[in-house]
Amino acid sequence: MIQSSDTIVLKTISHGDTSKIVICYTKNFGQVKLIAKGARSKKSPHKNLFFPGRHINISYYEKPNRELLLFKSGELLSSFNMIEKDLDRMTFSQVMMDLLDHTMTHSESQESIYKLTLTALQNLNQRDIPVYWTYWSFHLQLLSHLGFHFETDICHQCQSTITTTATMTHHQELLCDVCNHGALGFIPLTKRILKTMKALLNEEKAPYESYTKIERQTLWKFLWQYTHFHLESTRYMKSLEVLQQIYGTL
Ligand SMILES: [Zn+2]
């Protein structure tokens, strides 16, 4: 049976002399793994189609209980020129695709995740939205979709509403200043950072502000510590190394 779906390319792997294995997140069927035979040969009409972060439509032969499916044909739906020409945007796009690849399983099909990813790529392709803002929004909302939502204003210990600063413990629990007792080694979160995370989690188009280097580094540190804690497999993402090389310690 032939299936067809709009999809986002997450990852490609060279296979044999001219073929490619393509891992996609499809709109209708969740993650799909395809083999595109001959896709690397110069004569192939699909030689420039598969690239992580591409938005394409694909047709493939569906077979029950088969993990690797045979690609039939495909076409580009939208091109993100700005991303493909800009190293910063490209790096963030790669981290997004890598994060999805490391957190999705074969059976999950969530159109909401597909839409979230497509919106993030469209925003990343716009000059007037800071790249880190688009990235944070995508990452935090993806965590929510995956069931790792967290309250940004409730103390884990005393359950009181946090109105000023807070800290994130090694067990990824948010503590108010009273409960924390000034313990060292935890990530301090200012009121502004907490407010930003709440906005990014709850609003599709949260207004963005400019942040100091320390604020940005704190948010990065929290984001990855929280993600690595809950999603062990993300510790070994290759694209994170690239991100770290460009931006220093995250
Ligand atoms: Zn407390």
Image (tube, rainbow, N blue to C red):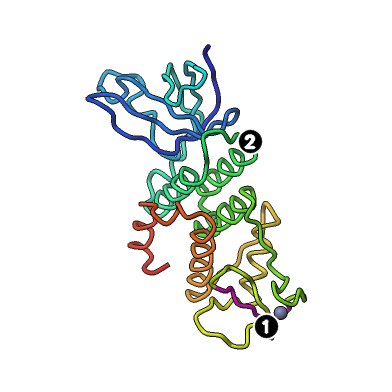
The residue carrying mark 1 is: 179
Q: Amino acid at mark 1?
A: Cys
Left or right, 22 with respect to 180, comes to left
Q: Amino acid at mark 2?
A: Glu
Left or right, 12 with respect to 184, comes to left
Left or right, 37 with respect to 138, comes to left
Q: Residues within 10 Å of mark 2 (few under 14, many from 20)?
A: some
Magenta span includes 95: no
Q: Nearer the viewer, residue 82 or 9?
A: 9
Q: Residue at x 55, y 43 (%)?
A: 122
Answer above or below: position of 135 versus 212.
above
Magenta span includes 164: yes
Label 1 C-beta lies within 8 Å of the nearest ligand 1 atom: yes
Q: Position of residue 101 (x, y in %)?
A: 46, 42
Query: What is the spatial separation of the Cα atoms under label 2 and label 1, in whole angstroms?
Result: 40 Å
Q: Position of residue 12 (x, y in %)?
A: 36, 35
Question: Image quadrant for the C terminus?
Answer: bottom left
Q: Position of residue 88 (x, y in %)?
A: 40, 55
Q: Quadrant of residue 53?
A: top left
Q: Cβ–Cβ below 8 Å for labels 2 and 1?
A: no
The residue carrying mark 2 is: 111
